[in-house]
Amino acid sequence: MTGLDGIGPTTPAVRGPARPSVRGAGFRLPSDAAEAPAASAATAEVMLGGMLALQEAASAAVHDREARRRGQEMLAALARLQRALLEGHRDLPGLRRLADLAEDVPQAADPGLRQALAEVTLRARVELARHETVRTG
């Protein structure tokens, strides 16, 4: 792997005649022409790996955010349904909303969030099944 040798203090660019180079100042180019492409390929692989890791982390965060939002919406719909039942009436629009929310639940990347979301979804489906049997029975 090619390294950076002889990094010295930076000097401002000067207009006019070229300044003589000072040994040890600036960057040193590889002396072997075959060394440069190999170093570039290795650097590109490291950079690509880092970018993919960042993209994966960002993707996981987006999935968790969407899953958390869906879980909170299901909990709010379950709470509205509970209040409606305690008041003595059925909330048919709320049941439809709950059914929509429980139908296509996003997959969370975080295992704890995934488990909590599965439990909330199960509770929503139990309530939907319970109210379906009341309506048809």
Image: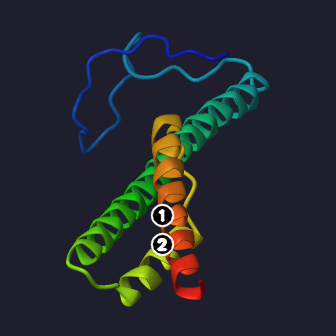
At 50% from the left and 48% from the top, the residue drawn is 119
Q: What amino acid type is highlighted by mark number 2?
A: Leu
Q: Compared with residue 110, is residue 78 higher up or lower down, i.e. above or below?
A: below
**By what rule are the colours in the image chosen?**
rainbow
User: At numbered mark 1, what does the secondary structure look like: helix, strand or loop?
Assistant: helix
Question: Which residue is most to the right?
Answer: 34
Q: Which dot, 1 or 2, sits closer to the camera?
A: 1
Earlier residue among tags 1 and 2 = 2
Q: Which residue is mark 1?
A: 124
User: At numbered mark 2, what does the secondary structure look like: helix, strand or loop?
Assistant: helix
Q: What amino acid type is highlighted by mark number 1?
A: Ala
Identify which residue, 74 or 89, lies in the foreground: 89
At 54% from the left and 65% from the top, the residue drawn is 125
- In the picture, measured across the screen, residue 71 lies left or right of residue 1, that is left
Q: Compared with residue 33, is residue 56 higher up or lower down, i.e. above or below?
A: below
**Residue 111 in picture, x, y percent from top left:** 53, 36
- Classify 10 Å Cα crowding around label 1: few (below 14), some (14-19), many (20 and above): many
Identify which residue, 137 or 59, lies in the foreground: 137
Counting the numbered discs, the total is 2
**Residue 126 in picture, x, y percent from top left:** 53, 62
